[in-house]
Image (cartoon, rainbow, N blue to C red):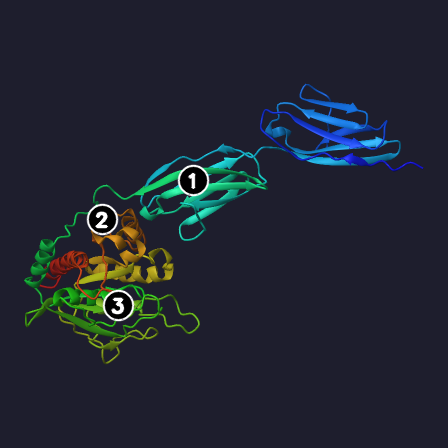
């Protein structure tokens, strides 16, 4: 009895360049066998494209001018009498790039998109920047859509400048696609501010010599927990004293709760003079989301509205669930013009605006609407600019060249409703142990506008 029909040489997988020729060969152990060839489930017939040849026990399939459509699994079915054997092989185009990406020049804040495509789907890819592996994270998104690979850098910054490579792999094959990304800031300032000692001293002198029609002018700061309200007051104190100060207990940006519990008036002393500035500051407990898991809600919007009208007394203790009412003994039912607020300042952290909830913005808008009805001028102070923007972190003098800062100010304007020319980016004193010129100039510039807004309001509305 003879041996059973078997394959002595199986078909081999083939990787070939487009336009070249592929030869598939199978051999069995019996003479007189017949073969049928299949591409996928479809039987293959002789044509100008494909030819099938039998040489004794050897069977060959020749594919000329290989194209993408010729790829896939090929199967030969060999029959001898009642016995059948099969062999299968995968034919693929050699891995190649079918669409590349080019060098990119972008302005900071724009979205950078790199797209490339290969000729096969049995692939994976990794992205590198300057030969270092990239991972998804803040602002970086990687996608694969079949043969296409996409890298998105949202809100690109100067630090995203570099040489980017997409390394596509399939087994032992790999191809690389590379390009340079260059991210630049604005080539000129979009808001003019001179960061010189002369400017600093001029702004300081104007504020120390300022004599409002109503004294003191009252400036109220409000905003979410950890936005830097108390730190802003301390920073003003620092620059007028010329040394570090902590007159107002500062909110912790990461703690998630407010240090400010009482309604307290903060007066600023001027270094070398036995006098205080003719304007004062009040900050309030931070705004928070609705109550969850017994977590306090922060200041009630009703208390801030009462403060605008001068009804909140000094040292009033904020109670989130029980705002001050007219029936309470401490309620100031007959406020003087100086008890009332003359400018309302919303303090928002630049690095957290995007993540602030609609509930907090809803509370701020409720307060803003009341202030608008009363005609009280409103300003937004955007803190933590150095945390959000690499440009501001490395050089505050470049803050008005930064697309990131302008973008955050626009987001603040859109969500809060304050016009762009009433939004001021600042950096509070935090880690510093000595005064910094650029920090002072930003704060003094913002403060100068606030004080003038407050004085104009007092003259027109409170002094008949």
Look at mark 3 in the image and give the residue it sits on: 304
The quarter of the picture where residue 13 lies is top right
Tag of residue 366: none
Please state which of residues 303 and 130 is positioned toward the viewer in this rendering: 130
User: In the rendered view of the protein, which quadrant contains the N terminus?
Assistant: top right
Q: Could you classify mark 3 by the number of other residues whose Cα lies within 10 Å: few (under 14), some (14-19), or many (20 or more)?
A: many
| Residue 357, visible in the rendered structure | yes
For label 1, the crowd category at 10 Å Cα-Cα, with few meaning under 14, some 14 to 19 and many 20 or more, is many
Please report the residue visible at 44 percent of the width from the left and 72 percent of the height from the top: 293
For disc 2, the marked residue is 400
Residue 366, above or below 400: below
Which residue extends farthest bottom? 329
Query: Quadrant where the C terminus lies?
Result: bottom left
> Who's the residue at 63% across and 32% down the image?
71
Please tell me whether mark 1 or mark 3 is closer to you in this view: 1
Which residue is at 78% across, 31% downward?
A: 27
Secondary element under disc 1, as helix, strand or loop, is: strand
**Label drawn at residue 114:** 1
Q: Position of residue 193 (x, y in %)?
A: 16, 50
Residue found at the far right of this picture: 1
Relative to 138, 242 lies left or right: left
The Cα–Cα distance between marks 1 and 3, rounded to whole angstroms, is 48 Å
Task: Please state which of residues 121 and 462 is positioned toward the viewer in this rendering.
Answer: 121
Q: In front here: 320 or 46?
A: 46
Quarter where residue 256 is shown: bottom left
Percent x, y for residue 41? 72, 33
- Report helix, strand or loop for mark 3: helix
Mark toward the start of the polypeptide (2 vs 3): 3
- What distance separates the C-alpha of mark 2 from that of mark 3? 32 Å
Label 1 to label 2: alpha-carbon separation = 28 Å
Q: Position of residue 124 (x, y in %)?
A: 54, 43
């Amino acid at each position: 009895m003879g041996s059973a029909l078997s394959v002595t040489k199986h078909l081999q997988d083939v990787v070939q360049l487009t336009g070249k020729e592929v030869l598939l060969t199978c051999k069995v152990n019996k003479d007189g066998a017949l073969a049928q060839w299949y591409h996928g489930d479809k039987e293959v017939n002789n044509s100008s494209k494909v030819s099938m040849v039998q040489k004794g026990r050897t069977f060959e399939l020749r594919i000329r001018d290989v194209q993408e459509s010729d790829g896939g699994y090929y199967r030969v079915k060999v029959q001898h009498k009642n016995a059948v054997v099969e062999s299968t092989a995968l034919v693929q185009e050699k891995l190649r790039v079918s669409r590349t990406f080019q060098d990119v020049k972008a302005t900071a804040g724009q979205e950078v998109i790199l797209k490339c495509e290969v000729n096969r789907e049995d692939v994976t890819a990794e992205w590198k920047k300057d030969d270092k592996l990239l991972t998804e994270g803040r602002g970086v998104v990687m996608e694969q859509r079949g043969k296409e690979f996409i890298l998105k850098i949202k809100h690109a910054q100067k630090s995203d400048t570099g040489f980017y490579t997409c390394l596509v792999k399939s087994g032992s094959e790999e191809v690389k696609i590379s390009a340079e990304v260059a991210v630049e800031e604005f080539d000129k300032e979009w808001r003019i501010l001179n960061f010189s000692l002369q400017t600093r001293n001029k702004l300081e002198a104007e504020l120390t010599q300022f004599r409002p029609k109503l004294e003191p002018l009252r400036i109220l700061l409000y905003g979410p927990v950890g936005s830097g309200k108390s730190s802003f007051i301390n920073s003003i104190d620092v620059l007028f004293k010329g040394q570090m100060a902590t007159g107002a207990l500062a909110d912790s940006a990461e703690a998630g709760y407010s240090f400010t519990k009482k309604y307290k008036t903060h007066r600023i002393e001027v270094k070398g003079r036995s006098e205080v500035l003719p304007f004062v500051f009040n900050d309030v407990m931070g705004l928070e989301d609705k109550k969850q898991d017994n977590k306090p809600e922060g200041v009630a919007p009703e208390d801030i509205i009462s403060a605008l009208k001068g009804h909140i007394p000094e040292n009033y203790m904020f109670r989130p669930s029980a705002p001050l009412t007219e029936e309470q003994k401490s309620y100031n039912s007959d406020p003087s013009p100086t008890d009332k607020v003359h400018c309302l300042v919303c303090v928002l952290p630049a690095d957290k605006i995007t993540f602030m909830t609609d509930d907090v913005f809803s509370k701020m808008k409720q307060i803003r609407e009341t202030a608008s009805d009363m005609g009280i001028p409103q300003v937004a102070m955007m803190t933590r600019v150095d945390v959000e923007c690499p440009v501001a972190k490395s050089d505050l003098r470049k803050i008005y060249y930064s697309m990131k800062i302008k973008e955050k100010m626009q987001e603040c304007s859109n969500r809060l409703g304050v016009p762009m020319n009433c939004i001021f980016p600042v950096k509070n004193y935090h880690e510093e142990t000595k005064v910094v010129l650029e920090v002072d100039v930003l704060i003094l510039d913002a403060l100068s506008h606030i004080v003038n807004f407050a004085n104009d309001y007092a003259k027109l509305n409170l002094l008949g």
